[in-house]
Image (cartoon, rainbow, N blue to C red):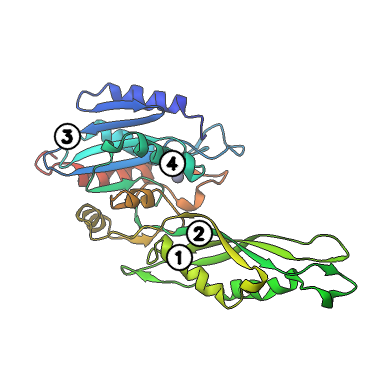
Amino acid sequence: MSFNEDKIADFIYGRLLKFSHLKTERIGNAIVSRVTGSSKLNVILAGHIDTVLPNGNENPVFKAPRLYGIGACDMKGGISVMLKLAEDVISPKHSITYIFYPTEEVGNADNGLLKLHQSNEEIFSAAAAILLEPSSSVIEAGCQGVLRFELRIKGERAHSARPYMGVNAIHRSLSVLEKVVDFGEPKPIVEGLEYHESLQCVFIKGGIQGNVIPDEVILTLSYRFAPNKDSVAAKEFIRCYFEDLLDLSLGDEIQYADVSASALPSLNNPIIKELKDAVEKVNPKLGWTDVALFQSIGIEACNFGPGDAELAHSSSEYVTKEQLEECYVVLKDLLSDQEES
Ligand SMILES: [Zn+2]
């Protein structure tokens, strides 16, 4: 699990060190392994080696054809495909950098890929990156951004026997909540793909005591936005969306907590396009992944890996040999020099 990757990092490092065509280094619990190709381009294949906390599935169980266990799908399946490719693709078309990194299933600040970029920026030079997160071996393009923010709705305290002397912030928050519900489920089309947006209130706080008209309600909201908006546009959209309901003279305000950037589908990137032509199926990515981090540092990326993303983080997650082979075959074909293969 996260912050506990020593053993899996030892295993990956020890295994890759045996291959002379690879140049492998270990940076903390991140393993970076490179092989030189015949073109001038470089492709990154990346995957996280941590898992979420186990939930009764810490011991692996094989019930043919499924291998159950914590992280089987998210994302030891992708990691095992990366390992096999690293071992088998000896003379690739493009140079390949394999990045195995820790602490992805945690907050952004601890993200192992981000930390590796901060300490070893030179590793991150590539024409494209493929993240082997589970995607049933279809391309999951781009990703949603996530903006967390608070709406602070103000009022004026008064005795509850004389409510006309105050302004009830809880009552005022009703119209704001109605507007949140009215948001619905917009589905913007970006590069031909239908993304989903959502606006959800995830916490609510307000009230002082039984005989006091409350003077503040804090609504915490999560806005998942499509990649036709960047983080700045997402904030501006939220400001405009609630503008009419906020009373600045009472002190209402929006406070942005944190934002995870969205990522564009990048389907015109030559390497991602080649992958797209091979698998012929592209879905928009729901949720956030490290493709956004790659995009923020100027590397176009997509998700493509074995296993069903809907099983990720569930106690019944599993992967099958067939799923691994399906993903492996496509990537081996993409990465191998045609003359050699
Ligand atoms: Zn994952």
Q: Earlier in the sequence, mark 2 or mark 3?
A: 3
Position in image of residue 196 (x %, y %): 46, 67
Residue annotated with mark 1: 234
Judged by depth in the image, the label closer to the viewer, 4 or 3, is 3
Q: Residue at x 18, y 32 (%)?
A: 90
* Mark linked to residue 36: 3
Judged by depth in the image, the label closer to the viewer, 4 or 1, is 1
Identify the residue at the far right of this view.
161
Say which amino acid is labelled 4. Met
Q: Do tag 2 and tag 4 residues touch (Cβ < 8 Å)? A: no
Q: Do tag 3 and tag 1 residues touch (Cβ < 8 Å)? A: no
Say which amino acid is labelled 1. Ala
Q: Do tag 4 and tag 1 residues touch (Cβ < 8 Å)? A: no
Could you give the CA–CA distance between mark 3 and mark 1, rounded to whole angstroms? 40 Å
Residue annotated with mark 4: 75
Identify the residue at the far left of this view.
339
243 vs 152, left or right, is left
Local packing at callout 3 (Cα closer than 10 Å; few below 14, some 14-19, many 20+) is some
Q: Earlier in the sequence, mark 2 or mark 4?
A: 4
Residue annotated with mark 2: 147
